[in-house]
Image (tube, rainbow, N blue to C red):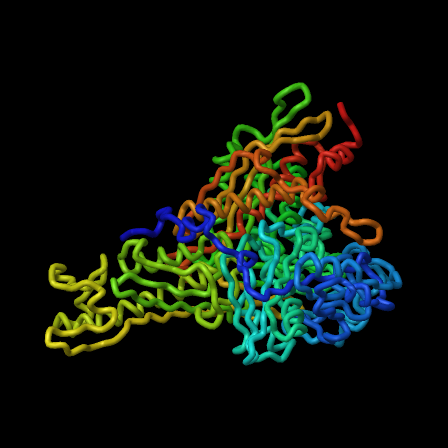
Amino acid sequence: MGVIGKSVTRKDAGEKVTGAARYVNDRHLPRLLHAKYTISPHAHARIKSIDTAPAWQVPGVRAVILGEQVPILTGPILADRPPLAIGKVRYAGEPVALIVADEEHQAELAASRLVVEYELLPVVNGPLEAFADNAPLVHEDIESYHNHGDVYPQPGTNIANLFKIRKGDMAQGWATGDVVVEAALGFPQSDHAAIETRCVQAEVTADGQVILHTPSQAPYEIPEQFERFFGVPAGQVVVHTPLVGGGFGGKGAVQLEFLAYLATKAVDGRPVQLLNSRERDLISSPVHIGLEARVRLGATCEGKFTALEIFYWFDGGAYSQMGVVMNKAAGIDCTGPYRVDHVHVDSYCMYTNHPYSTSFRGFGHPEMTFVIERAVDLLAKRLGIDPLVLRAMNAIQPGDTSPTRALLDYSNLGDVSACIERVGELIRWDEGVRQEVGPHKVRAKGMAALWKTSTSATDAGASAVLTFNRDGSANISVGVVEIGQGTRTVMAQLVAERLHESIDRVHVSLDVNTRKDPEHWKTVASSSVMLSGRAVLQAADDAIRQIKEIGAVALRAAPDDLAVARGRVFLRSNPAIGMPLEKVVHGYRFPNGNAIGGHVVGHGHYLMHRVTRLEHETGQGKPGPEWTVGAEAIEVELDLRDCTYRLVRAAAVIDAGRVLHPHLATGQVMGGMHMGLSFGSREHFVYSERGVVLNPQFRSYKLLHYGEHPEYLVDFVERPYLEGPLGARGVGEYGLIGMPAALANALSVAAGVELYRLPLLPEQIWRARGGDVR
């Protein structure tokens, strides 16, 4: 019915608009108990004693659980984190004890009354401090941790992982170049700030099943981790994920699920709910990674890039979680979407006494892009070349290779040059990048190009099942989580397109049940449309094949002579000869009562392929299936007296391969742009000298508010990705990736000084200008 490329109504629109949508915390259960946890007020300290007696004196308390009672270490890659601190605490906000009580307020009161005696230890208050010689060790026994992936911690240091890129000949690269620029840059830790805080309900049934209701982005990973760390067979763990109130990667981590399980086990399996307050969500659960970096970029006088050297020190926080993969992801795409033949990168994930980091929208790429794009702007100024022209001159092309030496072609690489050209048109770059608009005000423009490949598991995959109702309408079942991105609507579009059916006759449930729904790797990495989309199309094709086989008998024709469309199966040569799908999809019954065929159930699956592990010493290999590319720009208005500024216009152009749902794609990119500008302009954690977060509430942790945003301009390039569903690429993360860098470039032009550290607060700009208020 031609639904691809159209902005059909979202499948979850009705529930959300009317308020009927239900999230985990909306489930009200009989006999539900409540859990809360006591947190450490110190970033690094030895636990000398814990007095639980005051907690037990609170009415309604059912259980008090300490770390020593659960002597296990968890972690998706490197198992280094106890669910509750054992022996010492490594960040302010770390859970130390877990309380279960009849009422939420009782559990909260008991948790606050627990008495813990600490012996303070030296604090590692950032990744460069962690890297310094003789730095205090956050983990003294790294070598004992079980490694579940390709990570390389270094015993006796705070290095949780070191990833290297070695491409070309650096001596030749520097010798070939005429100009070198260098800079040190910083991108601080911050929060995911999803509207729904993390919440879990858990119970253990009489037959030993562990039932979890959680807003997880990775529900199928939870049973695997429960089996690995708690010895619970994966088949006995059932995860229900309803609609999720935003995640941005933060709900891909497994944390509260472990605590909720410990809580229900302590009360004989009764249902227990653990709900984070906003403050706990900000400082106790995993956060957005930070970065310190040093970059050197060389080029010829004509502007061709010749050599790139980068050192990344990522602030992974107290535990490795996904930080040890994000530092790898940044190294993999370190050059940005440019051809650089000679590359040397050392990317470290450092243990610090900060809250630990996990996946965040862009997965190390907003940070990596900030580094390379500031260097490109510095080079443009040094050479006297227009920044847009310099980027277009060096844009990576089919036939070039990535930093990991993977060959790029017209399918797996988006069209960088087209994105740069189009974003220049949208932001009206040719009208000039800086102009005075008043006695003390200037307007300036900055831009950044971007790219990202998915550093997913090499065997990441998804499955889909398609069934039919008695009226011939279809039901699609997938494991992708609806976190607001609209993927399940797109899945329905793909089925409707394949069946040539109305979108209203394709139904899709909005929740996930790991026991009933086919598996999907994770709802992360802008990969859901790719993985589940391919599986859905295969399921639709499988169903069509079955429909034709049954219809062929009923219509006395060969299956290849039949077509399926508009709720019917019919002869291609004479569409009048056919029958409604409801007479076929549950088997066909002849007039005399004989029946043939059976229930049509379409099955589909897709597994990421031709992706390799990377060689440890050089980084060589193919890290992902394709590279989505784009370009972004922003215009700002800066008041030179007090260095306050206004965001005027922001533009983004992404090569989406093929846009399946224009409104959803535009909304995804626009939302990402907004987040990127929020990080660039204000979002960050402020730490005390002792490593304690000083802004753990929305009163002091500042977000970009409605009304402070610029005019958003979004467009797409469509160079098809042949492996993608109908040529599509993922777009979920890309609006964010380039915006912090573009903002820094624009404000550097406006202020007349180079700005190297985010967020770009007016005070920082004022100080960079030497306190000049003229």
Q: Residue furthest top?
A: 439
Q: Is residue 371 visible?
A: yes
Task: Give the number of callouts.
Answer: 0
**Residue under the image location 73 percent in, 68 percent down:** 84
- Between residues 194 and 298, which one lies in front from this camera angle? 194
Relative to 103, residue 8 above or below:
above
Q: Residue at x 63, y 75 (%)?
A: 268
Residue 473 found in image quarter: bottom left
Q: Residue 122 at what x, y percent from top left?
A: 87, 60
- When the figure is inspected, residue 61 is found, relative to residue 703, above or below; the finding is below
Q: Nearer the viewer, residue 501 or 289?
A: 501
**Quarter of the rendering occupied by the C terminus:** top right
Could you tell me which residue is drawn at 77 percent across and 66 percent down?
Answer: 56
Which image quarter: residue 69?
bottom right
Q: Position of residue 73 (x, y in %)?
A: 71, 73
Q: Position of residue 87 (x, y in %)?
A: 81, 70
Query: Which residue shows up at 65% across the image and 31% down it?
Result: 645
Quadrant housing residue 152: bottom right
In the foreground, 306 or 767: 767
x and y, in percent, of residue 598 in the image? 25, 75
Left or right side of 600 for 535: right
Q: Is residue 165 visible?
A: no
Name of the residue lying farthest toward the right: 119
Please, which residue is most extreme toward the front here? 59
